[in-house]
Image: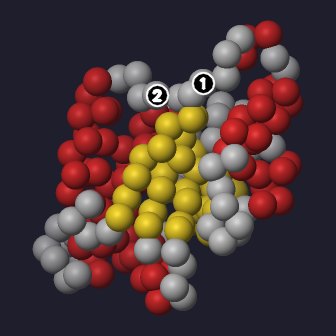
C-alpha cells in the first residue's frame, strides 16, 4: 500500500518542515509514503470562499485515480486514538488498498465535489490547528501507527 498526504501550498515555517522531513524519512522504513504539495491558488484574494474551494477541489481531484481511497482530514471526521488509528491503517492494508490518499484542504475546507468523491473523513482533534501544523502532526501519527503495528516501543501504552 502507498500512502500519500496531499496538501495545498508549501510549508512556510522552517521548523515545521524540519519535523516533516524527520518523520517522512522515518516513515519510509515502514511503508511507501509521499507528501504531495498542490501549489497555492494564484490571486486567491480576488476569489470568493466558494470559488477558492472549487479551484482547490479541481486540483485535488486531478491527483486522484479511480481506484484510490480518498480520505479527507476534516473537523467532522471520525477521531481515533493512536492505537485505533494504527488498526484503521492495518484494515486498509488487509483490504488490499493500493493507494490511500489523505488530504488537508485549503483554509475554507473542501468543495462539494471533493466531499462526494471521498471515501471517508478523519478528524484529528476538536481543536483547530493551522494547515501547516497538521502536516507534521499527521505524518507523525502515521509513523506512530506503523510502529504500533510492528510492536516497537515508540508509542508507550
Q: Quadrant of the N terminus?
A: bottom left
Counting the numbered discs, the total is 2
Contact flag, marks 2 and 1 (Cβ < 8 Å) = yes
Between disc 2 and disc 1, whose residue precedes?
2
Q: Residue furthest bottom?
A: 94
The residue tagged 2 is 10
Residue at left offset 57%, top offset 28%:
39
> Left or right: where does residue 108 sit relative to residue 88?
right
Residue at left offset 77%, top offset 32%:
55
Q: Is residue 91 visible?
A: no
Q: Position of residue 93 (x, y in %)?
A: 46, 82
> Left or right: where does residue 45 sit relative to residue 155?
right
Is 90 situated above or below 132? below
Q: Position of residue 46 (x, y in %)?
A: 79, 10
Label 2 residue SS: loop
Tell me which corner region of the image, top left, top right, bottom left or bottom right, holds residue 22. top left
Q: Position of residue 79 (x, y in %)?
A: 56, 66
Residue at left offset 26%, top offset 42%:
21
Q: Is residue 148 visible?
A: yes
The residue tagged 1 is 40
Amino acid at each position: 500500500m502507498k500512502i500519500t498526504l496531499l496538501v495545498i501550498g508549501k510549508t512556510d515555517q522552517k521548523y515545521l518542515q524540519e519535523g516533516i522531513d524527520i518523520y517522512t524519512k522515518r516513515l519510509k522504513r515502514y511503508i511507501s509514503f509521499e507528501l504531495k504539495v498542490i501549489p497555492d491558488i494564484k490571486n486567491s484574494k480576488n476569489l470568493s470562499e466558494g470559488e477558492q474551494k472549487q479551484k482547490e477541489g479541481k486540483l485535488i481531484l486531478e491527483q486522484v485515480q479511480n481506484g484510490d481511497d480518498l480520505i479527507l482530514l476534516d473537523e467532522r471526521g471520525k477521531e481515533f486514538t493512536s492505537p485505533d488509528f494504527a488498526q484503521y491503517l492495518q484494515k486498509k492494508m488487509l483490504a488490499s488498498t493500493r493507494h490511500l490518499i489523505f488530504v488537508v484542504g485549503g483554509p475554507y475546507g473542501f468543495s462539494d465535489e471533493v466531499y462526494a468523491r471521498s471515501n471517508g473523513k478523519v478528524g484529528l482533534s476538536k481543536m483547530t490547528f493551522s494547515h501547516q501544523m497538521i502536516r507534521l502532526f499527521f505524518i507523525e501519527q502515521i509513523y506512530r501507527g506503523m510502529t504500533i503495528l510492528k510492536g516497537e516501543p515508540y508509542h508507550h501504552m
